[in-house]
Image (cartoon, rainbow, N blue to C red):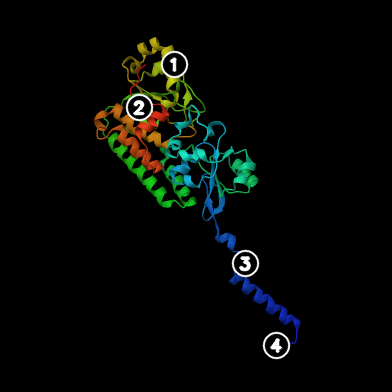
Amino acid sequence: MNTYYRRTAGFKALAITLIGLTLVASLAFGAPQAEKPMAQSRVVTDMRGRSVTIPTHVKSLIALDAGALRLVTYLGAADRVIAVEDDGHGREKSPYEFFALATYRIAYPNLRNLPNIGSAANHEGIIAAAPDLIISSAVEVAKLDQLQETLGIPVFGVDVDVELYDAERFYDQNAILGVVLDKEERARALNDGIKALLQDLAERKARVKAPKRAYAGGMMYYGPADLLRSTGDFLPFDLVGATNVMPTNPTGNRQPYMTGLENLIASAPDYVFIDAANINLSKAGYRTNKATLDALVPAFANRQVYSTFVYKYYGTNWDNQLVNVFYVGKVLYPELYNDFTIEEKAEEIWKLFFNVPLSYAEVCAQQNVVPQRVDW
């Protein structure tokens, strides 16, 4: 080295050499490099069309707003949730009247033992929890962007308004969440299972000769209501080949809405199905108008009124919704659905969605309903 420096005879060459050695040492011993952050992150497109830079491996997360946590449990990632909401309808920790109507709370009871961050408005609490990722069902892109900017944490937007009418979008959402959470295999298994169920239902529906006329009431949607909250887009009717006597929501959003007693009477359904979430209010509403309904509505006159599992509570219960499809099929077309019991089918579907076994009796007990003909 000394010979070299004497030959070059200058400090400039020495400085260049030392800089070069420093760079080599930095590379060898793992000093920060410009490329390293890129190697530890990736860009994904969420369900609102936003490009979100997320960690390569998401080890911790918080799910915010209706339905987001349900989707996380479907993907088998409940063990990565580090804190939960506990305000409003997102009360994940505090049991209350409707607590167990979100079936994922029965499947993953340990979620209620996690720390409480209140709600999406508790920015300080979320930042202190320091999750790798936020999964939010907020609809507005601006709201998602603002939350991400405020928290300094990636926010991935999901769509909890998607219904199985748009099965491809539902599958796409599971698939992208599988990528985000390193659960691609689980997402494929879930999607394949749902596809098989829908194919089975399509084959049974094709054998329906005379569609039955039916009404769905007692829908839970932004709060309780009686049997007059109905829907013209009731998946069980559509998938088993029944005629829904009610029109779709006039707003076009395919969600439940309030109708009137005169409309229920005029529609004259032969069967009525009441959502478990509002079974007591629906019973009270029936008794208030018992004489009229018994005289003018065939379903009430012939005692063809049945309870079903809750369809919507803190977002769509897609798992229970599919159980309801098979139950409605058994009621309306028993000859086409006589190869299983509803207990067997419900446990099969819950196992598919949650990847943990659930007891039919336990779910019925906690949700305070048994799908059956009501005795009013």
Using the numbered discs, state the Cα–Cα distance from disc 1 to disc 3 in whole angstroms: 71 Å
Query: Up-down: is 313 above or below 127?
Result: above
Q: Which mark is residue 371?
A: 2
List x then y, in percent, for residue 111.
49, 40
List x then y, in percent, for residue 94.
52, 32
**Residue beneath disc 1:** 284
Q: Amino acid at mark 1?
A: Ala
Contact (CB < 8 A) between labels 4 and 1?
A: no
Query: Up-down: is 113 above or below 305?
Result: below
Q: Earlier in the sequence, mark 1 or mark 3?
A: 3
Q: Amino acid at mark 2?
A: Pro
Mark 2 crowdedness (10 Å alpha carbons): few <14, some 14-19, many ≥20: many
Contact (CB < 8 A) between labels 1 and 3?
A: no
Using the numbered discs, state the Cα–Cα distance from disc 4 to disc 2 in whole angstroms: 91 Å
Q: Give the quadrant of residue 306.
A: top left
Task: Say left or right for 46 vs 9.
Answer: left
Using the numbered discs, state the Cα–Cα distance from disc 3 to disc 4 in whole angstroms: 29 Å
Say which element carries label 2.
Answer: loop
**Residue beneath disc 4:** 2
Q: Which mark is residue 31?
A: 3
Contact (CB < 8 A) between labels 3 and 4?
A: no
Say which element carries label 3.
Answer: loop
